[in-house]
Amino acid sequence: MASVLLAENQEPGFSFENCRRNAFLAKKGNALPKATKTGTTIVGIIFKDGVILGADTRATEDTIVSDKNCSKIHYLAKNMYCCGAGTAADTEVTTQMICSQLELHRLSTNRDIVPVVTACKFLKQMLFRYQGHIGAALVLGGVDNTGPHLYSIHPHGSSDKLPYTTMGSGSLAAMAVFEAGWKPELTEEEGKLLVRNAIAAGIFNDLGSGSNIDVCVIRRGSVDYIRPYETANLKGEKQMSYNFKKGTTAVLDVKTVPIIIEDVVVHHTGESAVESMDTSS
Amino acid sequence: MTKRVNTTKMAQFGSDAFAAKSFWHNGPAPGASYNFPNMRSSSGEEEMQRSQTPITTGTSVLGLKFDNGVIICADTLGSYGSLARFRDCQRVMKVNNNIAVGVGGDYADFQYLKRVIDQKIMDEHIADDGFALKPKALYTWLTRVMYNRRNKFDPLWNNYVVGGMQEGVPFLGAVDLRGMAYQDRHIATGYGSYIALPLLRDAADKNPNMSLQQAKEIMEKCLEVLYYRDARSFPKYQMAIVTAEGVTVSDVLEVKSNWEVAHMISGF
């Protein structure tokens, strides 16, 4: 039974079992609940010593902000993190599934560090299998034994290997900042500032992105997961106390009604009272 | 020729055309459009719909105010769908000594309006009364024209950026094909609004009173980024600069692009 250690072998072909059921239910009036979209700005760059990933923290349901501070940088392995844009459930579950697949792979190949390209392969093979129905657009970054790597993966299963990339609704604003400011061999401080500026461009110019800036720096052997890196949109401080003073509402009458609780407690005594746990076998 | 009530409008030749009347009853009248009895009319509208699709188009136009003037720039491409057909279309024009206009969208609609504006300026010269058209006046007039065309379902499919000096103060405004108009310190139309506007906003926030040289640099940077990321852009462009001294439309300049990053990309 090799499947205990190996990742489960995926069946070939497309698995659309539930699509017909969903269409039938929708016609009957039970439409699927609207997916929470992340409507996002996510970015990644390669700098001198590794990879820096950045993301905003707003999750939207159409035009409402459903989560003001969600986490879009997901853990895949100790040397790899993945930012996700698109349908929030899809990005969360897909990265979790590939995270566990990677751990099983790591154990079965007896390595300490799994190559980043392995995660990219797992992700895009799964997304292609679902033909774009899984709405997950990902920016995958990590450092392995061959150096830092950065991939952008689209919902239909294509991937690009790039030195800097952006995804999500704010990607054009963020990419403008990168095209104007990225150069090879950036230092860590320059890289963090560039990523911060790109996410800020997304937050302030795109309505689907907002709130804070999260940053994750991945180097060979160490990771800084900085959440939040910057709180760009703080709620305004209340200038006065809005509590009403005692006595604002006049008290006309006081009536005290004691609540009497009758409680019956039964104590069992004797040997049959205490049951012991069966700890054999 | 007798004229009867409740008969068709067909001409009646001499005597009772009783057979003709029943034959042509409710039939087509000469000169009028005829609705065939068994055909459903598609929308109930008498006239043809005339909201067009743009054919030869220009992409983004950028505008920026600096300390003592305004810059408007646009590349020199007239796209024919996905074909880069006309590579020397001038999309920024000088109107008079204190107004410049940049245009994106359908080039034919711009050429029509350019004639109208040029005629306006000519009429002013002829009147010779010392009055010169001001940028805000042109901007307001343009808004009215665009809005009224839109209400007739026959828009001029354009995005205009109007810049100039209004009584010594820099003026910058934009009007779109629906007649939506606004004024701001920085303007970008088309793809520029997604790609260049974040850069223009950031530069203007950091440096509210920039000089002409700084403004030119940020505009060149924006055009460079647009050349990288807009699939309907072109590396050649023109700038119109309006100051108290007047309007200059530059020669055709070229974007300095850096493709060194290509060496770092391999595999997928």
Image: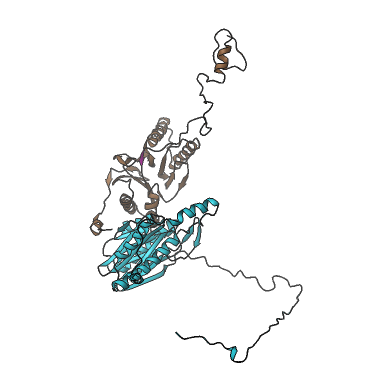
Quick check: can you spot residue B167?
Answer: no
- Residue B247 at x, y percent in the picture: 35, 42
**Considering depth in this image, is B240 or A38 the residue closer to the camera?**
A38
For the C terminus of chain A, give its image quadrant.
bottom left
Is A148 magenta? The answer is no
**Magenta stretch, overall SS:** strand
Q: Which chain is in brown here?
A: B
Q: Which chain is in cyan here?
A: A
- Residue A37 at x, y percent in the picture: 46, 58
- Residue B139 at x, y percent in the picture: 45, 41
| Residue lying at the far left of the rendered structure | B263
| Residue lying at the far bottom of the rendered structure | A270
Q: Which residues are magenta?
A: B55-59
- Residue A47 at x, y percent in the picture: 29, 65
Could you tell me which residue is drawn at 54 percent across and 9 percent down? B13
**Considering depth in this image, is A9 or B58 the residue closer to the camera?**
A9
Asked if B106 appears above or below A95 in the picture, the reply is: above
Could you tell me which residue is drawn at 39 percent across and 37 percent down? B110
Q: State the count of labels.
A: 0
**Considering depth in this image, is B267 or B73 the residue closer to the camera?**
B267
